[in-house]
Image: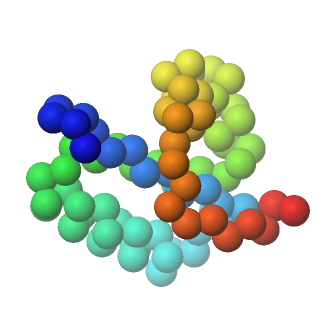
């Protein structure tokens, strides 16, 4: 990472997450924050990504510039 850069994590889901999974993600995000990373996080469905991407150009740009770390393709 470049100096002063941040890390944006998008968890893309088919449907809203179960409480237990959301809790585990919150624990992961807290661990990364505690590591002093400049972190932006979001958990969204594909439909939510489309809606916010249309409304906010900076979010759309971040999604276009992203790198996939793990892909489980259940969208077809």
Q: Which residue is at a point 81% across and 61% down the rendered structure image?
A: 75
Q: Nearer the viewer, residue 72 or 27?
A: 72
**Could you say where residue 67 lies in the image, as x and y percent from the top left?**
51, 48
What is the quadrant of residue 51 in the picture?
Answer: top right
Image height of 56 relative to 28, above or below: above
Residue farthest to the bottom?
20
Q: Which residue is at a point 22% across and 36% down the rendered structure image?
A: 2
Q: Which image quarter is the C terminus in? A: bottom right
What is the quadrant of residue 48 in the picture?
Answer: top right
**Could you say where residue 1 lies in the image, as x and y percent from the top left?**
25, 43
Residue farthest to the right?
76
Image position of 12 (left or right of 47): left
Image position of 1 (left or right of 44): left
Residue farthest to the front?
2
Q: Which residue is at a point 74% across and 66% down the rendered structure image?
A: 73
Image height of 4 relative to 22, above or below: above
**Could you say where residue 47 lies in the image, as x and y percent from the top left?**
74, 44
Image position of 62 (left or right of 64): left
What is the quadrant of residue 15 in the picture?
Answer: bottom right
Colour logic: rainbow
Q: Nearer the viewer, residue 44 or 66?
A: 66
Tell me how many marks there are.
Answer: 0
Image height of 44 relative to 57, above or below: below
């Amino acid at each position: 990472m470049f100096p002063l850069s941040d890390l944006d994590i998008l968890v893309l889901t088919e449907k809203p997450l179960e409480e237990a999974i959301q809790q585990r993600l919150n624990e992961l995000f807290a661990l990364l924050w505690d590591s002093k990373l400049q972190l932006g996080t979001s958990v969204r469905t594909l439909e939510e990504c489309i809606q916010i991407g249309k409304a906010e150009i900076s979010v759309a740009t971040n999604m276009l510039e992203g790198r996939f770390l793990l892909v489980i393709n259940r969208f077809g």
